[in-house]
Image (spheres, rainbow, N blue to C red):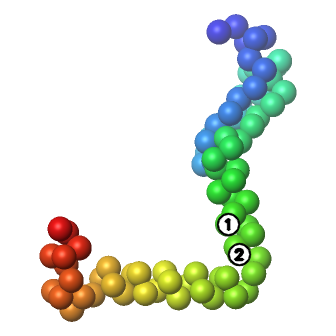
Amino acid sequence: MPKKRVRAYCPGGAPNEQLAGKLTTSTFLAMFFVLRCDAHAIQGAIETAWGADETVREITDVVKAVGQLLRLSSRFWLRFGQTALD
């Protein structure tokens, strides 16, 4: 594709993809938009909103801790592991 026809670049949310979009503006001189894909933008907004509330952060931390405990617990696995696989 000719360099003068590239107007926008829409990378995923990964930082290296965003950086690639910014760096390519020197190669594609007509490019004036480096967009972030909607799914990643929404995910970032949700994480920011959840992180802003102290109570939500505490609940999220507890749920993560319980999930990790259940995932790593040999006692839990011995008791419920086969049921979880079925």
Q: Nearer the viewer, residue 11 or 16?
A: 11
Between the residue at mark 2 and the residue at mark 1, the CA separation in whole angstroms equals: 6 Å
Indicate whether 72 appears above or below 45. Answer: below
In the image, 30: left or right of 13?
right
Name the residue carrying label 2: 51
Name the residue carrying label 1: 47
Quadrant in the rendering for residue 3: top right
Indicate whether 32 appears above or below 84. Answer: above
Quadrant in the rendering for residue 11: top right
Residue most extreme to the bottom? 75
Q: Nearer the viewer, residue 18 or 57?
A: 57
Query: Which residue is at 49% across, 81% downward?
Result: 64
Type of amino acid under label 1? Glu
Q: Nearer the viewer, residue 58 or 33?
A: 58
Query: Which residue is at 69% across, 63% downward?
Result: 46
Query: Which residue is at 69% across, 58% downward?
Result: 44
Percent across and percent down for residue 42 are 69, 53
Does dot 2 land on a helix, a strand or a loop? helix
In the image, 35: left or right of 65?
right
Which image quadrant: the N terminus?
Answer: top right
Query: Which residue is at 83% across, 18% downward?
Result: 30
**Residue 59: which numbered mark, if any?**
none
The answer to whether marks 2 and 1 mark residues whose Cβ atoms lie closer than 8 Å is yes
Indicate whether 32 appears above or below 63. Answer: above
Percent across and percent down for residue 80 are 21, 83
Does dot 1 land on a helix, a strand or a loop? helix
Quadrant in the rendering for residue 60: bottom right
Type of amino acid under label 2? Gly
